[in-house]
Image: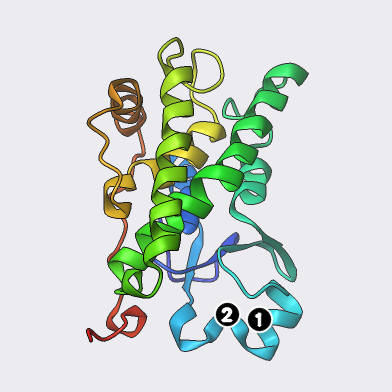
Amino acid sequence: MTHTSTTFPRLYDHAPSANGYKVRLLLSWLGKPYTLVPVDIFAGESHTEDFLRHKNPDGRIPVLEPEAGRFLAESNAILLYLAEGTPLLPTDAFERAQVYQWLFFEQNTVEPNVGTARFWKLTGRARFHPEALALRVESGRRALTTLERHLQDHTFLVGERPTVADIGLQAYVHVAPDAGIPLEPFPSINAWLARVKALPGHIGPLAPYAPNAMVPPP
């Protein structure tokens, strides 16, 4: 649930962002109230002097402010922070390391490829990067093949219960068709996505990109 009051934590976010979606989904799963602070990244709001100095020197969202004046960036770091002490982050050292493994995999192979291809295609930028787009799509397909291989024998990514690893991967995997990667060849991924979607607290689809994110047609 979200609020417009000054409830902490505050989440600085851009609604079409799948990285932000991860955090919103976790907060919803946890039933944790928070203040949503919209940030229009295409209007430069994440590159103001205040944002860069005090919230995230890298100028990206999402950023979590868990309490006044403390800021945490990087979506998967935020997931780990919020999940601490909950069943979504195992206490067993090896299982916890497996959660890290899948979150690193997501940032190394899924988000840079599926996320970038999706952004280019949905905002009209694909025509500027035809060769790079093809490489991103193929790399994204290989990442999904890896995930499919794992999910053939696993209910969730780590053990038999959902963890923040499932949230981290679901965010970009479920929108892979927007990147030009159909999900029909991945039955185990589709079954896993259905299991994740059926969990209490699931939220709706990503918001579309606003007009100021679009590149005009040629």
Q: Which residue is denoted by mark 2 in the rendering? A: 46
Residue 144 point in image, percent of width and height: 42, 34
First of labels 2, 1 by sequence position: 2
Q: Amino acid at mark 1?
A: Phe
Image height of 160 relative to 124, above or below? above
Residue 29 shows up from this direction = yes
Label 1 environment density (alpha carbons within 10 Å; few <14, some 14–19, many ≥20): some
Residue 158 point in image, percent of width and height: 56, 20
Residue 92 shows up from this direction = no
Pick the front one: 68 or 137? 137
Occupied quadrant, residue 202: top left
**Residue visible at 72% across and 21% down?**
91
Residue 31 point in image, percent of width and height: 45, 42
Pick the front one: 50 or 141? 141
Label 2 environment density (alpha carbons within 10 Å; few <14, some 14–19, many ≥20): many
Quarter of the image with the C terminus is bottom left
**Mark 2 to mark 1: distance in Å?**
6 Å
Q: Amino acid at mark 2?
A: Ser
Q: Which residue is denoted by mark 1 in the rendering? A: 51
**Residue visible at 71% across and 69% down?**
68
**Residue visible at 28% across and 53% down?**
178
Left or right, 188 with reference to 153: left
Occupied quadrant, residue 49: bottom right
Tell me the SS state at disc 1. helix
Residue sitting farthest toward the top: 153
